[in-house]
Structures are given as structure tokens and as C-alpha cells.
Image (cartoon, helix red, strand yellow):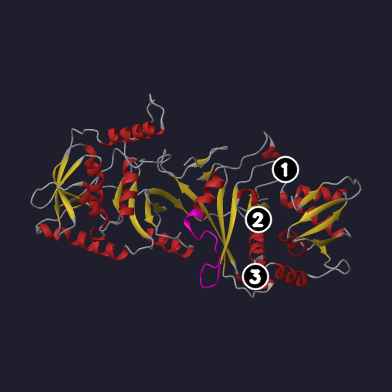
């Protein structure tokens, strides 16, 4: 099923999005975060960032992290995923990170820290960089049974168009993961996502080796983009267009 | 239940209002309805004779307009593959005779469909039947709808076909992905002598979803014709495609 275009949540929301390019808001965030003294701290598998109102506003406008509801007015708290933390620290070069609540760590130490916590972190980070660097908003896809969901602009303005599944293979082209290994995995992903008017986007991180350094990860892997579409011959004579909330009924 | 028998044409599953609302009665009514649909009497019944040497049947009595989009023409004669025979026999539009003119029953026809010697498998037949019943024009991948040779012996017209079938048999490895059908969308102007490029090509996939490398390899073989992958699972026929996309860089 191909999408018939972005589904904006309100009448003039497309114009609002066009007037507020995400790249510009992210540039403002970079300046604000660079000037901030606040450093992200590990908390569980995520990171906690204490913020002030101006930074809070920019993190919300660029849809990084989840703001934790508190009764405090002067300070706010954000929970950032490992990918978000590393992207802000390494790719946007604006977030400070402190591991043991004392000194700030550099990108190499943070890379090792992330890798030690999760052997799949490099793969997910590679996919995350691929999407965010194209200025798509990337959020966790747990609700839809996928890795990420991506938005063309802020989720308050537009519905997400793609549900993203991340797969990976080594430099011999051999699939390395158990994702989409059996047919029911495909049926499940497509059914779940088409039912909420999202196309399934398969991101394949190609050429990945376990011992890659950070520069090698970014320079020697390629991210292949393919959509997984189901064709229902009784419903349409070619790939259907997803419209509104209509999805698969088979 | 909606999916049950969706491969058979004209079957609308509507449960009749059952005077006796018991479970047994409802189930019986359900099967009666299906049998009524299957047993619809057709006035136009064609006849074909099986020719073992070529693994196809020659159509000897042609009835109805279905032959515009079914069967292949070889030197002016009409022949059909086992999957076409299976479908037409199942809907009662064709009677198949053996080489001594005995009528072959559905059991024998279905067994031949599943017999890989004729370039067909049971799953291949199920996919064929599903698409045909929905009005698509379905031909074996790469095989011409019509050929015409002058001054040739009858059997030599089939050299290409039997060679084709032999290649197909090799390709029909269990579990592998195979390019199987060239599909034209329903089209009243379809001509076997000038069918045009197919609308898409169907690849029948085995037990596992295709890997990226396989998808790319098969796409290259199809050149610019869109490729769809078909998975048949105990009669349930589903299609997927894996088009390459390029997410735009946003402002």
C-alpha cells in the first residue's frame, strides 16, 4: 500500500510546518543546548536531562525525548533514549553527558559506554542517524510493534507515515538478525501498521561488522530503504493507496 | 470465513437464515451454500485432450469467451497448461479427456497440478486460481501467448515449450523463489498476438521471506516490470512487494 501523502492533523498545519522548517528549529536547539550547563545522566537504560523553560520548549518543538510531568515550575526533566542522547552529543555536538555525576565524558567514552550496555546500539544508532539527518522526527515504535515511527514534522501537526523496522547484514550481504525471519513476521508487521494507516519501511543496515568503530560505522555501512507493501488483488488492480484510517481488512 | 473459498469465482458467502438455530444446522447450511455455488451448471463447457508428450492439453472444443485470455496458441492450435486446466475444470468450464478419450476426474487433474513434471506445483496452482478468479490475465513467466511457425512438424512447435517446462522443473526447487507469472490487469482488449508488456511479474516464494539480495537479483531479472512476491500457505494466497524507496530530505 502506498501512502496518498502526509495526513496533517489540522487545516493549515501543512503551511505551519512549511513556515517552520525542522532544520531551523534544530539549529536553535543546538545553540541553546551548547550554552546550557546541564548534562545528561544515565537513568535505567535511558538518560535524564534537567532543563529550563527555554530548552524545554526547544526539545519539545524538535520532539527529542519525553518530558516527565512534575509539579516544579522552574526546572523540567526530560528522559532521552540512548539514540537520542548519542545523536545530540555526537552528531549535533551540543549535549553534555556525565556518567558518574562528576566529569563530563567525550564521544569515544560515551560510544564505549553505549556499546557495553547494548550490542545492538550501533545498528539502531545508524538507522536513527539516517532518519534524523534527513530531518524526519523519529519516535519509538513500540505501540505499533516496530522499532520507530517517523513523522514529516512535529507529531502535533501530522500523523506518522512510516513504521520502521531495522534489519542488518554483514559486508557479505548475509542477514544477521532474526527480524522478519518467518512469514508471520511480515504478515504481522504489515497488518498492524496498515491498520493505522502507516506504511512499513524496512531499513537495512548493510555492511555492518560487530567490531566497527564509530567512524567505521558511519563510513562503511549503507542504509537501504525498502517499503513492505501488501497487494490485495481483489481490492485494487495495483498497489492501493492508504486513505485516512482505512487499512487492511483481510 | 470471508476468506474461505475466495479463490472460487462468484462465491458469495452469505449464511441463509436458519430456521433451526443450532450449530449443526448452521454448519450444514454453510456447506450447502458452497456446494450450490460450486455445482452451478454451465452451458458452455469446453473440451481438451491431454497430450503427455508435451505436458499440456489441446483444446478440441472451444466454448465461450474465456479463451481470449486462457491457453496458448501454437501454430494455430490452442493448448493449455495444467494450472489452466485445473482452474477451468474446477469451475466446470472444461472437461479433460485422456489420450483415449476417457474423461479425467478432478482428482487426477489436481494430482497433475501438483506434479512438478508439468511445470506446476500445488501452490502455484492455488495462486493461479486465485488471480484468475479475480479476472486477471495470467500467463507463465516468459512464455509467449502465441507463436506461429510455417512448415514445421507439429511436435517441433513445442520444443520451446518442453524446454521451457524442463527449465521450470529445475527452478521449482522447494523453498526457492521463482519467477512464475506474467500478469496483465483485466483488459477487454487483450490479444494473445500482441499482449504488450505485463503489468507485473509474480514470484512465488517458498518457506522463508526473500532476503534483500534475492529481491534485488529478481528485480534485475524482471528489468523494469514491477515484481510482486506471492506466499501460499495452506490455500491462503497473499502478495507482497518490496519497492525501493528514498525518504526525502526534509527542510
Query: Is there one chain holding both mark 2 and mark 3?
Result: yes
Mark 3 lies on residue? A217
What is the distance, in whole Å, between disc 2 and disc 3 at their CAs?
18 Å
Q: In the figure, is residue B60 to the left or right of B210?
A: left
Residue B223 position in % (x across, y down): 39, 58
Quarter holding residue B162: bottom left
Q: In the figure, is residue B120 to the left or right of A167?
A: left
Q: Is residue A100 above or below residue B195?
A: below
Q: Regarding mark 2 in the picture, which secondary structure is present there?
A: loop
Residue B226 position in % (x across, y down): 41, 52
What is the distance, in whole Å, between disc 2 and disc 1 at their CAs?
17 Å
Q: Residue at x 79, y 59 (%)?
A: A47
Q: Earlier in the sequence, mark 2 or mark 1?
A: 1
Query: Is there one chain holding both mark 2 and mark 1?
Result: yes
Mark 1 lies on residue? A19
Task: Please say if the residues under marks 1 and 3 sit with CB atoms less than 8 Å apart.
Answer: no
Chain at tag 1: A
| Quadrant placement of the N terminus of chain B | top left
In magenta segment, residue B142: no
Q: Is residue A17 above or below residue B208?
A: above
Q: Residue at x 73, y 72 (%)?
A: A112
| Magenta stretch in the rendered image | A169-184
Q: Residue at x 38, y 58 (%)?
A: B222
Q: Earlier in the sequence, mark 2 or mark 3?
A: 2
Amino acid at each position: 500500500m502506498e501512502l496518498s501523502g502526509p495526513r496533517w492533523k489540522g487545516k493549515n498545519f501543512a503551511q505551519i510546518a512549511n513556515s517552520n522548517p525542522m532544520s531551523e528549529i534544530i539549529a536553535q536547539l543546538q545553540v541553546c543546548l551548547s550554552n546550557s550547563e546541564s548534562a545528561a545522566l544515565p537513568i535505567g537504560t535511558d538518560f535524564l536531562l534537567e532543563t529550563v523553560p527555554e530548552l524545554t520548549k526547544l526539545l519539545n518543538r524538535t520532539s527529542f525525548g519525553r518530558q516527565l510531568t512534575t509539579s516544579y515550575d522552574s526546572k523540567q526533566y526530560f528522559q532521552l533514549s540512548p539514540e537520542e542522547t548519542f545523536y545530540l552529543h555526537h552528531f549535533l555536538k551540543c549535549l553534555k553527558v556525565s556518567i558518574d555525576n562528576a566529569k563530563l565524558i567525550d564521544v569515544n567514552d560515551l560510544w564505549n559506554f553505549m556499546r557495553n550496555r547494548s550490542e545492538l546500539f550501533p545498528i539502531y544508532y545508524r538507522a536513527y542517524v539516517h532518519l534524523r539527518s534527513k530531518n524526519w522526527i523519529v519516535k519509538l515504535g513500540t505501540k505499533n510493534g516496530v522499532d520507530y515511527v517517523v513523522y514529516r514534522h512535529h507529531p502535533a501537526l501530522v500523523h506518522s507515515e512510516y513504521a520502521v523496522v531495522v534489519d542488518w547484514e554483514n559486508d557479505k550481504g548475509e542477514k544477521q538478525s532474526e527480524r522478519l525471519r518467518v512469514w508471520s513476521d511480515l504478515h504481522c508487521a504489515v497488518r498492524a501498521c496498515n491498520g493505522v494507516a502507516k506504511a512499513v519501511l524496512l531499513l537495512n543496515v548493510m555492511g555492518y561488522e560487530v567490531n566497527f568503530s564509530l567512524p567505521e560505522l558511519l563510513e562503511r555501512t549503507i542504509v537501504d530503504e525498502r517499503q513492505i507493501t501488501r497487494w490485495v488483488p481483489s481490492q485494487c488492480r495495483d498497489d492501493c493507496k492508504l486513505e485516512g484510517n482505512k487499512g487492511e481488512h483481510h | 470465513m470471508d476468506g474461505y473459498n475466495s479463490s472460487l469465482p462468484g462465491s458469495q458467502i452469505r449464511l441463509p437464515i436458519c430456521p433451526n438455530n443450532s450449530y449443526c444446522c448452521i454448519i450444514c447450511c454453510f456447506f450447502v451454500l458452497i456446494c450450490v455455488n460450486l455445482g452451478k451448471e454451465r452451458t458452455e463447457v469446453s473440451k481438451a485432450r491431454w497430450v503427455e508428450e508435451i505436458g499440456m492439453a489441446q483444446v478440441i472444443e472451444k466454448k465461450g469467451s474465456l479463451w481470449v485470455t486462457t491457453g496458448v496458441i501454437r501454430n494455430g492450435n490452442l493448448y493449455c497448461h495444467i494450472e489452466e486446466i485445473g482452474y477451468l475444470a474446477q469451475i466446470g468450464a472444461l472437461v479433460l479427456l485422456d489420450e483415449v478419450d476417457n474423461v479425467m476426474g478432478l482428482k487426477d487433474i489436481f494430482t497433475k497440478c501438483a506434479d512438478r513434471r508439468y511445470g506446476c506445483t500445488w501452490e502455484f496452482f492455488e495462486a493461479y486460481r486465485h488471480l484468475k478468479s479475480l479476472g486477471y490475465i495470467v500467463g507463465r513467466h516468459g512464455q509467449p501467448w502465441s507463436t506461429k511457425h510455417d512448415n514445421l512438424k507439429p511436435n517441433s512447435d513445442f520444443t520451446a515449450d518442453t524446454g521451457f517446462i524442463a527449465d521450470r522443473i529445475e527452478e521449482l526447487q522447494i523453498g526457492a523463489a521463482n519467477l512464475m507469472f506474467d500478469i496483465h490487469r483485466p483488459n477487454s482488449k487483450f490479444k494473445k498476438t500482441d499482449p504488450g508488456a505485463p503489468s507485473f511479474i509474480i514470484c512465488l516464494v517458498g518457506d522463508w521471506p526473500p532476503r534483500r539480495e534475492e529481491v534485488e537479483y529478481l528485480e534485475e531479472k524482471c528489468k523494469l516490470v514491477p515484481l510482486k512476491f506471492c506466499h501460499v500457505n495452506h490455500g491462503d494466497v497473499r502478495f507482497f512487494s518490496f519497492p525501493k524507496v528514498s525518504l526525502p530530505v526534509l527542510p
